[in-house]
Amino acid sequence: MSRKLCLFLIVALFIAATVALAGGKFVVGHAVYAEWTANGWYHGKIAKKCDAGWHIAFDDGDQKCCAPSQIVIDVVPPKAMVKVGVKVLAKWSDGRYYPGTVSAINGNKYSIAFNDGDQGTVSRNQLRLR
């Protein structure tokens, strides 16, 4: 396979993943952040369907059945999808992701009003759509 074809397929898969993200569709094997406890979001992968939604295998070995509202795909969102008022998980200074809402956009920086009342500014690669 040529390099151009390989690159085209990689881009096509990324676009397909982004479209699935926009449609809220989860797939076994997706890397995700899932809510283990209230506002305690941790990284893992979707393992299978379960009664409440999706069974998550967390990176630390823990497992939990999570409702779709407790799961966020681990993909940097396209710039066009990040607008003021959009609900996100955003990276905080401790390196963890927390829920919030985009409150302002200034160039490549996104102001976040976190659900706990804190404010922060992040780059797009530090956002995941909720």
Image (cartoon, rainbow, N blue to C red):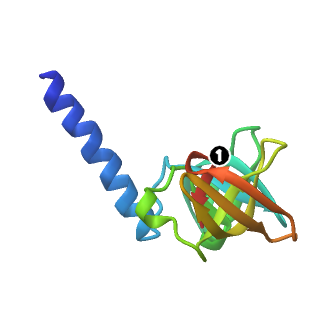
Q: Residue at x 58, y 73 (%)?
A: 86
Is residue 52 visible from the viewing direction of this image? no
Q: Would you say 4 lies left or right of 53 here? A: left
Image-quadrant location for residue 52: bottom right
Q: Secondary structure at mark 1?
A: strand
Q: Residue furthest front?
A: 106
The quarter of the picture where the N terminus appears is top left
Image-quadrant location for residue 103: bottom right
Residue 5 lies, with reference to residue 125, above or below; the image says: above
Q: How many callouts does the rendering have?
A: 1
The local crowd at label 1, few if under 14, some if 14 to 19, many if 20 or more residues have their Cα within 10 Å, is many
Q: Nearer the viewer, residue 77 or 50?
A: 77
Q: Residue at x 31, y 54 (%)?
A: 16
Q: Which residue is mark 1?
A: 44
Query: At which x and y percent is residue 90?
Result: 69, 56
The quarter of the picture where the C terminus appears is bottom right
Residue 103 lies, with reference to residue 78, above or below; the image says: below
Q: Residue at x 39, y 57 (%)?
A: 18
Query: At which x and y percent is residue 83?
Result: 52, 70
Query: At which x and y percent is residue 43?
Result: 68, 46
Query: At which x and y percent is residue 73?
Result: 54, 56
Is residue 106 visible from the viewing direction of this image? yes
Mark 1 belongs to which amino acid? Gly
Q: Nearer the viewer, residue 16 or 55?
A: 16
